[in-house]
Image: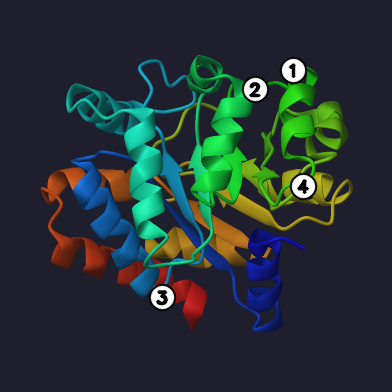
Amino acid sequence: MNIIENTFKKLKSLNKVAFIPFIVAGHPTLEKTEELILLLEHEGADIIEIGIPFSDPLADGPVIESAAQKSILNSTKVNQVFNSILNLRKKTNIPIVILVYFNTILASGASGFIEKCLKANVNGLIIPDLPYEERDELLSLIKETDISLIPLVTPTSNNRIEKIVSDCKGFVYCVSSLGVTGIRKDFNKDLSSFLNSVRQYTDLPLALGFGISNKATIDELKTHVDGIIVGSALVNKIEESNCNLEEIKEFIKDMVSPLKN
């Protein structure tokens, strides 16, 4: 059992649900990214998801896309992101998952990218544009490591769910509704049915993301899953507050409270 699955196991024994915040590396700067990760851990994050900025983030909505573009304009490079994670590893062992688009991996070469992940003690990878049919090379590279390839399933995955979740580790990223990331008022009315269909095929923890933006929604959804992922709302708070750590701290406290009480 790797560190991600062990985290979920510990939380389950306490009848708690994991809080998994997402931020974009280098937004607004890599120095701030390091500060944010330590703040998130201190305020109750169980796993941190870090997005490597990419110019064509097809799964992301305008908030995250804008943050990624600003990071790129600030000249954030992939190697710098890994250096920041290496620096963070002197201060924290919290599970870190990278969200990365496959072109970024290809640019380094798959084996070279995995070597960087191992060196920085990255615990998981989410690759939104890597289809099931094209992932064998990557799976073979991480097979003997503790790096988890975290699969994404959507309400339209249907008869592909069994294949998508096979041979994966860590947790399953369940997309709450169709479309790209972003704040939503309503969720798929068949959410329970969708999650039950995923549970038919895997014993991995299920974490729900896309559109979760407030305490009330977290309180409503937490009974259905093992983890809650908050991305756009947090990235938006970072942007709106000009990365004011006190404001972000209060925001996180509010979001975490339904999961820890």
Query: Mark 1 = which residue?
Result: 134
Q: 108 and 159: which one is in front?
A: 108
The kind of secondary structure element at disc 2 is loop
Q: Does the CB distance between marks 2 and 1 fall below 8 Å?
A: yes
Frontmost of labels 2 and 3 is 2
Three-letter code for the amino acid on which mark 2 is drawn = Leu
Q: Nearer the viewer, mark 1 or mark 4?
A: 1
Mark 3: which secondary structure?
Answer: helix
* Marks 2 and 4, how far apart at CA: 25 Å
User: 95 or 236, which lies in front?
Assistant: 95
Residue at figure coordinates x 86%, y 28% from the top left: 159
| Nearer to the camera, 242 or 39 | 39
Left or right of 14? Residue 41 is left
Between the C-alphas of marks 1 and 4, the distance is: 28 Å
Residue 257 badge:
3
User: Against 181, is 50 above or below?
Assistant: below
Q: Which mark is residue 193?
A: 4
Where residue 130 is drawn, which disc sits there? 2
